[in-house]
Amino acid sequence: MIAKFVTVQGFRNSNLAPAGRKAKASVSLFERSPEFVAQIVESWRTLHESLAGAVFSVLTERGWDSLQSLEADRSQFPGFVIHWPKEDTFEVLIIAVHKKAPQLQESDDNVSLMAVWLGNRLPYDLYTQEAEEEKR
């Protein structure tokens, strides 16, 4: 996608440009192409296997339903679910991940992004388990 849609001044093939220049030139593509964003985040996930495993384990233990396998290519998913368990704030998930894998030196932002990516959810519509059960 970079070679096809990103132009880096001074390079006929944008893939051959230094990473920093490629990243800077990719901003507009990042803003307009959900496919590009998905590929970038999925690639980032594969570079952080230990974090992915810890976050996936925490989400599974906390009963997040509809989780695909850890190896599923989420860049192929149609979009994010907007329902998020109210008790599973980012802070709660971050603490749980750090307790599960204290050797990880990942930032809180990385843990939060991984939770969103692996859980395939955005914290938009917060709900409690009791409220969900009452609806049924």
Image (cartoon, rainbow, N blue to C red):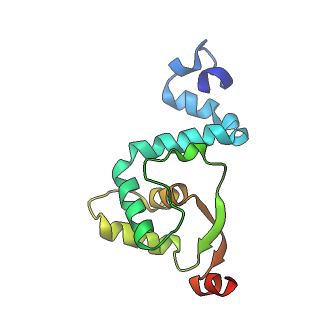
Depth check: give the residue in front, 77 or 28.
Answer: 77
Extreme residue in the top direction? 12
Q: What is the tally of numbered marks visible in this picture?
A: 0
On the image, the x and y values in percent for residue 52 come to 40, 54
**Residue drawn at 46 percent across, 56 percent down:** 110
Extreme residue in the right direction? 32
65 vs 11: above or below: below
Depth check: give the residue in front, 100 or 81.
Answer: 81
Q: Is residue 101 left or right of residue 135?
A: left
The quarter of the image holding the C terminus is: bottom right
On the image, the x and y values in percent for residue 50 come to 33, 52
Extreme residue in the front direction? 136
Residue 101 location, quadrant? bottom left
**Residue drawn at 31 percent across, 68 percent down:** 100
On the image, the x and y values in percent for residue 66 come to 54, 63
15 vs 90: above or below: above
**Residue drawn at 60 percent across, 26 percent down:** 2
Q: Is residue 107 visible?
A: yes
The quarter of the image holding the N terminus is: top right
Residue 124 location, quadrant? bottom right
Depth check: give the residue in front, 107 or 120.
Answer: 120
Q: Is residue 7 visible?
A: no
**Residue drawn at 59 percent across, 87 percent down:** 130
Q: Is residue 104 left or right of residue 135?
A: left
On the image, the x and y values in percent for residue 23 come to 57, 33
